[in-house]
Amino acid sequence: MNLLAVYNPATEALIAELPADDAMSVSGKAVQARVAQAGWAKVSLAERKACIVRFREGIVAELEALATTMTNETGKPITMSRNELNGLLGRIDFFLAEVDASTATQTVFSDGGMTEQIEHPPLGVVANISAWNYPWFVGGNVFIPALLTGNAVLYKPSEYAAMTGVAIARLLHAAGVPADVFVLLTGGSAVGTALLAQKIDGLFFTGSYATGAKIAAALSTRLVKLQLELGGKDPTYVADDANPQTAAESLADGAMYNTGQSCCSVERIYVHAKIYDAFVAAFVAAVKTFKVGHPMAEDTYIGAITRAPQLDVLDVQVADAKAKGAALLLGGNRLVGPGNWYAPTVFSNVNHSMELMKEESFGPIIGIQKVSGDAEAVKLMNDTRYGLTAGVFTPDEARAKALLAQVNAGSVYWNCCDRVSPRLPWSGYGDSGVGLTLSTYGIQTFTRPKAWHLRQP
């Protein structure tokens, strides 16, 4: 039997060995899902919704244990694990409330004996290769609306959140979703590669640009529906009329929450020269209040880096920034001891010659750059191959909207950051991906709209 070893990134201790799939088991499960999907699509929407309601109830009943599992395998601080699970409940409620209207057959024209309708049948068998940084959020954005709309789901959690994936499958099956309709695939990249070779009707991936590009290439000749939620290098501009203290406290949290391991973490900050010094001082002061500690401690804010290789990425960005003249104000080093730890790191006097301002960091590190005004800020915000989120801090709403309208980003923020809502679509420009999740569009994306032309005899 193949086994997947799961380690605690905070201690490097082995915490589990899980049965793992191989190419043969993936193929067999995909065939079973194809057969089971037809029956699941015939189950009434009311009963599919009832299954998800019971799944929600299971999460509530086991929330503390589920949070502990997520913290142990990802290094996420326990308070943030609880936040993720509690936040998921609202997303489930949104999908339950909106799925009927989003998938109801629509009559769009009726005249002279001719009726035109739009129906929303399911895609079929959906493959979901999910992420480790928010395994409940990111997975739930896909498998919940996919199941509600009548799809079967081949779900491969990240190997860095495999125990959470096991828990998700267990709770869904206990809630009444058949085991062949929500199918867990456990393992590393070889399992993901095997999944791509199966007969599927949609592939939904969340992860790095590099992996997303490989997936797109692998599926390029098969015309399978493909959605890729990839990385970002998310900028924020703090205008000259903003309150530097308020902006600094918000953006420090936006940059460092979940140890900076969020797709929409603030990764670049541009500050008007007029308030630059005040902002930088307030930002450093705010970051100094973030406690680094064991992820299970209630007062820990900065936890472990989930993937050890990311430490090398952070080291390279720090060394490059130093070599090119950036001022290191805080951190800039790994922390001593077992596990994957990196000190919260703040640079000022950065520029776009530095990797820190160009490539995704995915860690507790940030660069702050001085700008002369709005035009320079917009130019620098758009100087990227990514386009996930962007923000502006100013008391002037019209100014903020005018600036953000010029920025290439799927989500934009005025006086806030690092925020996701189930009511709004989650999408990106450029190398941040293709397709979307969340909102009513993120329900319909799991359907295949069918056009009906009906003429009365």
Image (cartoon, rainbow, N blue to C red):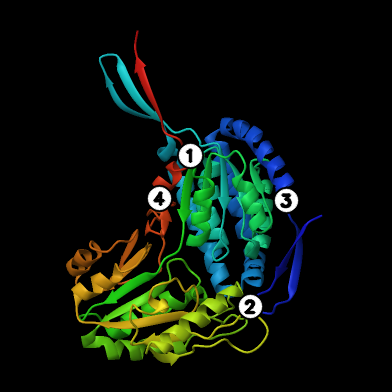
The residue at which mark 4 appears reads as: 439
Q: Residue at x 65, y 48 (%)?
A: 194
Cα distance between the residues tagged 4 and 2: 33 Å
The residue at which mark 1 appears reads as: 223
Which tag, 2 or 1, sits closer to the chain's start? 1
For the residues bearing labels 2 and 3, Cβ distance under 8 angstroms? no
- Give how far across and how far down residue 208 sits, in percent: 50, 62
Judged by depth in the image, the label closer to the viewer, 2 or 1, is 1
Classify residue 449 as left or right of residue 124: left
The residue at which mark 3 appears reads as: 22
Closest to the observer, 290 or 337: 337
The residue at which mark 2 appears reads as: 296
Categorize mark 3 by other alpha carbons within 10 Å: few (<14), some (14-19), many (20+).
some
Q: Amino acid at mark 1?
A: Leu
Q: Is residue 279 above or below residue 382?
A: below
Cα distance between the residues tagged 1 and 4: 25 Å
Q: Considering the numbered disc 4 on the image, is that residue within a helix, a strand or a loop?
A: loop
